[in-house]
Image (cartoon, rainbow, N blue to C red):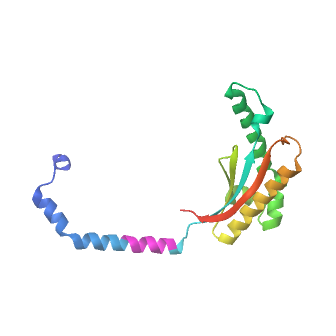
C-alpha cells in the first residue's frame, strides 16, 4: 500500500515517457472507437422554436414597491402558459401536423426550456433533423396560435412573437 502514495523515481518517469509509441497508439485506437460509435449510434438532433413572451408586468402592477408581488404574478402566469404549451389541444394539433402520436410527443420528443418572461424555447429531439425541425416548428406555431386565440387563464396584456426555428445537433 505504501507504493501507491510514493512519488515515482526519475527512472520510472523516464521509462513511462519513453513508451510514447504506446500512448499515441492508444489515443488513435480510442479515436477510432469513438468515431465508430458515433457512426453506429449518432446523437439525436435538437430543433428549437423560440417564442418571445412579455407579460407586461408594469401594466398589470404599475405602482408596486415590492418585487415579491411581481415575482408571484410572473410565476402564476408562467404556470398558466406552461399548461397551455403542454395542453392536449396544442399537442393534438402538433400530432396532426407531424403524424407523431401525442403520448410519444410528450415522452420522447418535446422539452420546454426555461419558461419565463422573455424567450421560451420549445425543443424537439429526434434522430432525423427534418422531423425534429418539423415538430419544433409545429409546436411553436400551435402554441403561438393558442396564445393568439386567448381563452381562459391567458392574460390579454401578454405580447408574444414566434421568432426563430432552427435545429442543433445534441451531444
Which quarter of the figure has residue 133? bottom right
What's the residue at 51%, 75% (across, down)? 39
The relative height of residue 37 versus residue 75 in the rendered view (above or below) is below
Between 161 and 43, the residue placed more toward the observer is 161
What's the residue at 70%, 69% (across, down)? 131
Q: Position of residue 65 (x, y in %)?
A: 70, 24
Q: Is residue 58 left or right of residue 128?
A: right
Q: Is residue 22 left or right of residue 131?
A: left
The relative height of residue 149 versus residue 30 in the rendered view (above or below) is above
Which quarter of the figure has residue 16? bottom left
Judged from this view, the residue extending furthest toward the top is: 65
Q: Position of residue 10 (x, y in %)?
A: 11, 57
Q: Bounds of the magenta span?
A: 30-38
Q: Is residue 137 visible?
A: yes
Between 27 and 52, the residue placed more toward the observer is 52
The relative height of residue 95 versus residue 154 in the rendered view (above or below) is below
Magenta stretch encompasses residue 142 = no
Q: Is residue 1 left or right of residue 54?
A: left
Q: Is residue 86 visible?
A: no
What's the residue at 42%, 72% (across, down)? 33
User: Could you tell me what secondary structure mostly forms the magenta stretch?
Assistant: helix
Amino acid at each position: 500500500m505504501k507504493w501507491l502514495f510514493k512519488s515515482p523515481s526519475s527512472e520510472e518517469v523516464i521509462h513511462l515517457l519513453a513508451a510514447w509509441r504506446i500512448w499515441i497508439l492508444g489515443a488513435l485506437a480510442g479515436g477510432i472507437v469513438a468515431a465508430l460509435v458515433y457512426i453506429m449510434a449518432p446523437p439525436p438532433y435538437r430543433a428549437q422554436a423560440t417564442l418571445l413572451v412579455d407579460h407586461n408586468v408594469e401594466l398589470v402592477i404599475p405602482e408596486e414597491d415590492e418585487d415579491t408581488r411581481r415575482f408571484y404574478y410572473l410565476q402564476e402566469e408562467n404556470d398558466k402558459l406552461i399548461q397551455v404549451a403542454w395542453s392536449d389541444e396544442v399537442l393534438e394539433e402538433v400530432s396532426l401536423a407531424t403524424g407523431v402520436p401525442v403520448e410519444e410527443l410528450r415522452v420522447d420528443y418535446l422539452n420546454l426550456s426555461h419558461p419565463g418572461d422573455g424567450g421560451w424555447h420549445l425543443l424537439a429531439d429526434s434522430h432525423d433533423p427534418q422531423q425534429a425541425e418539423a415538430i419544433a416548428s409545429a409546436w411553436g406555431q400551435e402554441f403561438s396560435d393558442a396564445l393568439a386565440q386567448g381563452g381562459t387563464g391567458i392574460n390579454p396584456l401578454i405580447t408574444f412573437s414566434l421568432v426563430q426555428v432552427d435545429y442543433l445537433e445534441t451531444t
